[in-house]
Amino acid sequence: MGHSLFLEHHKELLREATVIAEEMTSDFYKLTPNCWRRARYDILTLEGLEQDEISSHALALVAKYRGCHRDRVLKSAVFDFYRICLQDHNILKALDSCPDLSLLPLLLYIITHELVHVVRFSRFQALFEAPEEQKNEEERQVHLLTQKILKPLKSPELPRVMRYYEENRQGGWQYAHL
Ligand SMILES: [Zn+2]
């Protein structure tokens, strides 16, 4: 294994990418803090994942769970939450195999892409459990939206990430019901 977990310098870039991705996504969807609260999510790296959340090929996946407020049995106290599961090992492998890629823009793309999934699931614009062809169409939509969201950054490195995504789309990103 060896080089398969994010180290401190990777995590620093991850924090940076997360701030930018959340800001760009909020701006795009005009999300208020209240909307974000409704779309509950965590962003985790490999060391924080459950066995079922680890993928052999995806760079990241979204897992959906049902939560329940403590001390309450009312139905309205039930809520959905999402775990954005970053697959350190596959992300590092992608960087190794593709010298054109660098970590910050790659993470920026991945996190924005997964946040778009979360926003769309929580607004019921996409169904978490959908037939395969619908999932493929959703992936296409999410990719286009991610491009649109990140465009104002005018990052010279993002087009390379987009190309990588388009060439490795099979299994590069996925969402899974756990
Ligand atoms: Zn996706």
Image (cartoon, rainbow, N blue to C red):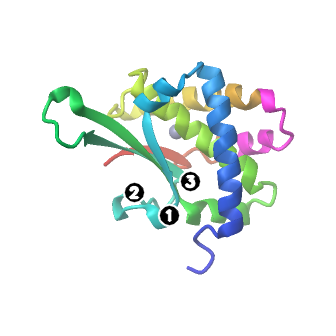
The image quarter containing residue 27 is top right
Q: Main secondary structure of the magenta part?
A: helix
Determine whether the residue tagged by mark 2 lies in a helix, strand or loop.
helix
> In the rendered view, would you say 12 is above or below 117?
below
Q: Is residue 148 above or below residue 3?
A: above
| Numbered disc in front, either 1 or 3 | 1
Q: Earlier in the sequence, mark 2 or mark 1?
A: 1
How crowded is the residue under tag 1: few (<14 C-alpha within 10 Å), some, or many (20+)? many
Q: Which residue is mark 2?
A: 53
Say whether residue 104 is magenta.
Answer: no
Please say if 45 is above or below 159: below
Q: Nearer the viewer, residue 29 or 99?
A: 29
Identify residue type, mark 1.
Leu
Q: Residues within 10 Å of mark 2 (few under 14, many from 20)?
A: many
- Type of residue at label 2? Glu
Please provide percent x and percent y for residue 93.
64, 65
- In the rendered image, the quadrant that contains the N terminus is bottom right
Q: Is residue 72 left or right of residue 79?
A: left
Which contiguous range is marked in magenta? 152-164
Residue 51: x %, y % from top left: 36, 64
Residue 167 horizontal/vertical position (percent): 67, 45
Check disc 3 and give the amino acid type: Leu
Of the image marks 1 and 3, the number of the one nearer the N terminus: 1
Location of residue 130 by image quarter: top left
Q: Which residue is mark 1?
A: 46
**Looking at the image, which residue is at 79% across and 27% down?**
152
Residue 161 painted magenta: yes
Residue drawn at x 54%, y 22% is 32
Q: Nearer the viewer, residue 157 or 40?
A: 40
